[in-house]
Each structure stands twice: as C-alpha cells, then as structure tokens.
Amino acid sequence: MKNKVFGTAVVLALTAACGASSPQPTTTPESEPTAETSVNTASPSPAPVAPPPPSPEELERQKKLAELEKERAAMRAEHEAEVARFTPELRASAKALAEKAYPTTRAALKAAMASQHRKPGNAARDVHRHPLETLEFFGLKPTMTVLEFSPGEGWYTELLAPTLAAKGKLIATSSDPNGPADARSTFYGERFKLFTETSPELYGKIETVIVDNKAPDLKQEGTLDMALLMRAAHGMVNQGTLNAWLAEFHKALKPNGVLGIEQHRAADDAVPEESAKKGYLPQKWLIAQVEAAGFKLAGKSEINANKKDTKDYPEGVWALPPSYALGDKDREKYEAIGESDRMTLKFVKKALPAQKPAAAAAEPAAAPNTAAPAAPATGPAPSPAAPAAKKKPATEPTAPAPAP
C-alpha cells in the first residue's frame, strides 16, 4: 500500500516538474491577440486633407512676384555693368562736367547731352524728347532749385544733375528702396538709388525725398523755383491723387515758381479716368485741373507733338518706344511711329486768395441780442444822448470767472 502511494506521488511530482520546464504550446496567428490584430480591428485613420488649390488671385500674385524678381535681377546686373563702364577717365570727365559753372542753360545742357556719362541708348531718345528745347521752354536756369518728380530710370536726371550741380540744386522724389520686397514701389526706389550710386561725381549732390504716392507729401514749402512732372500725371489720376499732388507742388514752389508738365496726350473728348489707364490724358482737362489748383497757364508748346501716335493700342502708350511692351511683335510698326504725342505745358504759381478771418465778420454789438432781456427801469428813462447803455455795473460779470 505504501509502495503504491509512493509511486503515485513520484508520478505526480514528475508530471509537475515536466509541466514547469516544457515550452509553452505555440498558437496559430489567428488565435494570438497581437497588436497587429488590434490595429486591424480598429477604425481606419482619416486620410490627410489636401490643401485647396491656389485662388486665381493668389496665382496672379505669385506670377507678378516672379516677374518682379526677374526684373530685379536684371536691374542689378545692369547696374554692375554700368559701374564697370565708368572708368577712371570717365569719372574724371563726369567730375569736371559737374563742377563747371556754365554761363547759360543752353551751354550747360549741350555739354551734358554730349557727355559719355549718359547710359548707352539714352542719347538716341533726344530726337524724340527734345530735352534742350523742352527745358528752355520751361525756363530752366543753372542757378535754380528744381524738383524732378518721379525720375524713373533717370533719363532727365542725367541732364539736370550736371546742369544744376555747380550753382543750383536738384531734388528728386523716390519711393522707399527699403520697403516690402514684393512691392513694385520698392523696386522703383531701389532702381533710382542704384542709378545715383553709379556716379557720385555727378549725382552726389542730389537731394532725394522719399514719398508715398498714396499720401502726397513733398516735405517742401516755398523752396522751389521749378517743379518738373514729366510723363507722370496719368499715374496720379490712376491713384486718385492728382489734386493732392498739385496742392503739394503749389505749396513747395516759391511765388511765381514754375510747374513744367510733359504728358502723353489723349483726345480732347477722352474720359480721363479711362485714358489714364493707357497712359494718356486729355489736354484741356489737365489744364483745367492744374489751374484750379492755383496755377496760371503761361505757355503751351508742340515741341513733343507726334501726329503718328494713334493712341489706340491695347497695351497703351507702353506699346511705343522705348518700352516696346509687345517685344519684337510689330516692333517695326511702333518704331516707325516713334514716341508718344505729348503736351508740353508751362504753369506759374499764383497766390491763393486770402481768406478773411471768421471773427472779422462778427459785430461786437450782436452779442446783446442773445442775452436775457434787461429788467424794467424803475426810474425815468434816460435821454437818448445819455451813454448809460454802454456801461454795466461793476458787479456784473461779462463772462464766467475762471475757477480758482
């Protein structure tokens, strides 16, 4: 009996020992609760939402920005080439040109027009723009203080700066070259800054006034002998600032100062707000605007007229030279037309009518009309000649006393 029990115990002990040391039974993947199984049974994650396509406005903005950067790169490359063109000999010649005091405007302008400092191709425009005749018509003198508004790439600045350097002064407006990189106004400011840096000998004396075309302010008052607005009035109309700029010119000019305007000329019956988009303005309308701003028309000239200009190009005046907006397309046609038909107008500043002070119209005797009626007199009425009505008792205040 004991042996049987003992045998049974041994068997049970061996069985327990074998169970503890034997490997766990393998299971098939279908029965194993793995993490993969739990993921497969969960709901799928939502697919990422694709961003909406750019709007037409955004695509247009990106396109314009790319074009602007391309123009900026070309501008800087052109500037480097122009700096390299200014050899020591050319710089010495430019310095002598700027330092010489010329006896007449004609002598100064002819010397500037013949100088090699001008950018290649600029002198070829003289036959279309007639700078000598135009500036003489305006009455330019080498001793004047002159404002050149919106000088662009410096075509006229090349001539004005050396003419005024010795005895006069040139002030030029510019947009901020340090403005937002994606703003075209910043590009224009950069361009003029690079232009003036090309030759300190010629342009070092120019006073640059930074302006915001949307908020006219020349920062000048009675300091100018002449202001020049060359082919830029249409931009003011497009921005709705023409009258504000004319007021600024009037304020900046000395008495009898000159405002010289050269502007692409539209037909007389053109709608200014529409023709301005193409770069043109009707002459009669523009004269009326300037005269309304306190100027008198002193003269008109047909120096820059061009009857070949039909003024009906889809690209506006920029289809013509020197812009050639269409590139090589119909280039010969536009080259044969030449530059635009332009009005050339000379205005003189008039004194604005003085305004009477508001207090001058008021009569001191009118004040009693608003006062309370006087108390009835208890004594006999004074005679008409008595001055009693002009006096008030010493104790009656005429105005509230100031607080202590």
Image: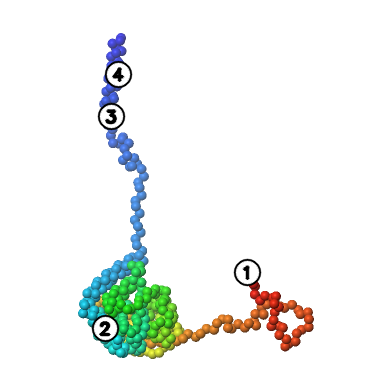
Whole-percent x and y of residue 252? 42, 81
- Within 10 Å of disc 2 (Cα), the crowding (few <14, some 14-19, many 20+) is many
What distance separates the C-alpha of mark 4 from that of mark 3? 20 Å
Amino acid on which the number 4 mark rests in the picture: Leu
Whether label 4 touches label 1, CB < 8 Å = no
Q: How far apart are marks 1 and 3 (CA)?
A: 104 Å
| Quadrant hosting residue 328 | bottom left
The answer to which of marks 2 and 3 sits earlier in the sequence is: 3
Label 4 to label 2: alpha-carbon separation: 122 Å
Q: Indicate left or right for 223 with 331 as reference.
A: right
Q: Quadrant of residue 121?
A: bottom left
Kindly identify which numbered label has been placed on residue 403: 1
Q: Is mark 4 on a helix, strand or loop?
A: helix
Q: Who's the residue at 54% across and 84% down the image?
A: 356
Drawn side of residue 228 relative to residue 393, left or right: left
Q: Which of marks 1 and 2 is in front?
A: 1
Q: Residue 12 carries which label?
A: 4
For the residues labelled 2 and 3, the Cα–Cα distance comes to 104 Å
Marks 4, 1: nearer the viewer: 1
Q: Which amino acid does label 2 sit on?
A: Leu
User: Which comes sooner in the sequence, label 1 or label 2?
Assistant: 2
**Horizontal and vertical percent for residue 127?**
27, 86
| Amino acid type, mark 3 | Gln
Q: Going from the N terminus, do you reach mark 1 or mark 3 first?
A: 3
Q: Which amino acid does label 1 sit on?
A: Ala
In the foreground, 314 or 262: 262
Residue 95 visible to an observer of this rendering:
yes
- In the rendered structure, find residue 97 and report the number of the disc placed on it: 2
Residue 336 in sight from this viewpoint: no
**Label of residue 24 in the image:** 3
Q: Residue at x 42, y 82 (%)?
A: 222
**Residue 179 image label:** none
